Image: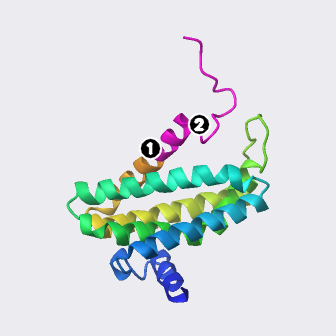
Amino acid sequence: MLSTLRQFLDLLLRRAGPSDLPASPRLLAGTFAVLLAVQGALASLIGESPAGMLPRALVSGALLLGWIWFLTRAYGHPARFLQTATAFLGVTLLTTPVLIPLAASVLGAGAGTAPPDIKFSLPLLLFVAAAFYLLVIESRILADAIEQPVFLCALLVLAGEFLIGAIALSIGLVPPPPGAAAAPA
């Protein structure tokens, strides 16, 4: 397991690509399970119920895997799905312990119905920098997998994030922003 974490770190530091990972369904499933456990532990630390987080994490993870499956097939590289998906989950696993606490700090953990009062701060700056770096790494992973320019892959990664967020919002896994109640028809 330590060697796998080292490979994920090499991906995060841009010293390796997804092709350096084994194409293993067990590794993919194990990485997904560990990521869920880490997200659950962090949710409880910031005051969110792990039971409430689990459905969101499962659905968003499944949608991410579906998006990667679609892209690897659409660009003619279906054999690269396992390595690419494992790489995405692996770098997410390493960045989650940084991003979740920063997001909670910026948005205010356990916020009520009022919209968060986001002000320029060091946690906000760190969150934006870490999220941007993750976008760069995921774009590079996808570019290596589907052999397309990194800029196009960045757009595809962002499109996937928006799609996953929209689906999660539409099925009620993420509450709508305060004041965004549907207008009467």
Please name the amino acid that badge 2 sits on: Gly
Q: Main secondary structure of the magenta part?
A: loop
Q: Where residue 95 sits: x, y (%)?
A: 59, 68
167 drawn magenta: yes
Quadrant placement of the C terminus: top right
Task: Residue at 49%, 40% (x, y): give it.
Answer: 167
Q: 62 or 75: nearer the eye?
A: 62
Q: Is residue 66 visible?
A: yes
Quadrant in which the N terminus is drawn: bottom right
Q: Is residue 114 above or below residue 146?
A: above
Residue at image mark 2? 172
The amino acid on which the numbered mark 1 sits, given as a three-letter code, is Leu
Q: Is residue 27 left or right of residue 113?
A: left
Q: Provide the residue designation for mark 1.
A: 163
Of the image marks 1 and 2, the number of the one nearer the N terminus: 1
Q: Residue at x 68, y 55 (%)?
A: 103
Q: In this picture, which residue range is highlighted in magenta?
A: 162-185
Q: Percent x, y for residue 156?
A: 36, 52
Numbered tag placed on residue 24 in the rendering: none
Assign a secondary structure to mark 1.
helix
Judge left or right: residue 181 versus residue 104.
Answer: left
Helix, strand, or loop for circle 2?
Answer: loop
